[in-house]
Image (spheres, helix red, strand yellow):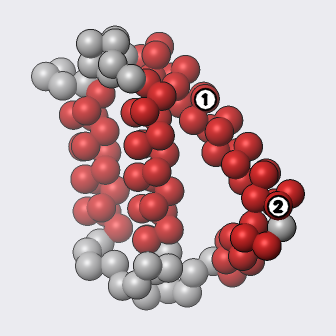
């Protein structure tokens, strides 16, 4: 597996030690979720996505964890990147647009 991106590891380590860096990460993720909630609210109905905030959190967490995993930071990835991203895309499409 390829080595994890060095800068990312350094920043994550710094976030664990430095409250200001940790706060920047928190702000970044909060702002990202806020924008995703806006997109979900515009692109889907409340029938399809009854809780856009929770849905945004789940999407963000899945995407971040997959990105980290695909770098090899969680160990060897058991299948191709293409298969994983295809499955993520299909999962999101089915969750957001069922029956379309």
> Residue 91, image x and y in percent?
25, 43
Which mark, residue 34? 1
**Quadrant location, the C terminus:** top left
72 lies above or below 53: below
Residue under label 2: 19
* Residue at x 26% of width, y 75% of height: 79
Q: Is residue 7 left or right of residue 59?
A: right
* Residue at x 33% of width, y 19% of height: 50
Q: Can residue 7 be spotted in the picture?
A: no
Q: Is residue 56 left or right of residue 85?
A: right
Helix, strand or loop at label 2? It is helix
The tally of labels here is: 2
Helix, strand or loop at label 1? It is helix
Marked residue nearer the N-terminal end (1 or 2): 2
Mark 1 surroundings within 10 Å by alpha-carbon count, few (fewer than 14), some (14 through 19), many (20 or more): some
55 lies above or below 27: above
> Residue 66, image x and y in percent?
42, 62
Mark 1 or 2: the one toward you = 2
Occupied quadrant, residue 78: bottom left
> Residue 70, image x and y in percent?
43, 71
Mark 2 surroundings within 10 Å by alpha-carbon count, few (fewer than 14), some (14 through 19), many (20 or more): few
* Residue at x 73% of width, y 43% of height: 27
**Quadrant location, the N terminus:** bottom left
């Amino acid at each position: 597996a390829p080595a994890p991106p060095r800068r990312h590891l350094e920043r994550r380590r710094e976030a664990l030690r430095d409250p200001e860096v940790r706060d920047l990460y928190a702000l970044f993720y909060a702002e990202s979720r806020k924008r995703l909630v806006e997109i979900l609210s515009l692109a889907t109905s409340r029938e399809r996505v009854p809780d856009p905030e929770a849905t945004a959190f789940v999407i963000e967490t899945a995407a971040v964890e997959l990105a980290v995993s695909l770098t090899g930071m969680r160990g060897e990835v058991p299948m191709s990147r293409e298969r994983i991203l295809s499955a993520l895309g299909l999962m999101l499409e089915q969750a957001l647009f069922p029956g379309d």
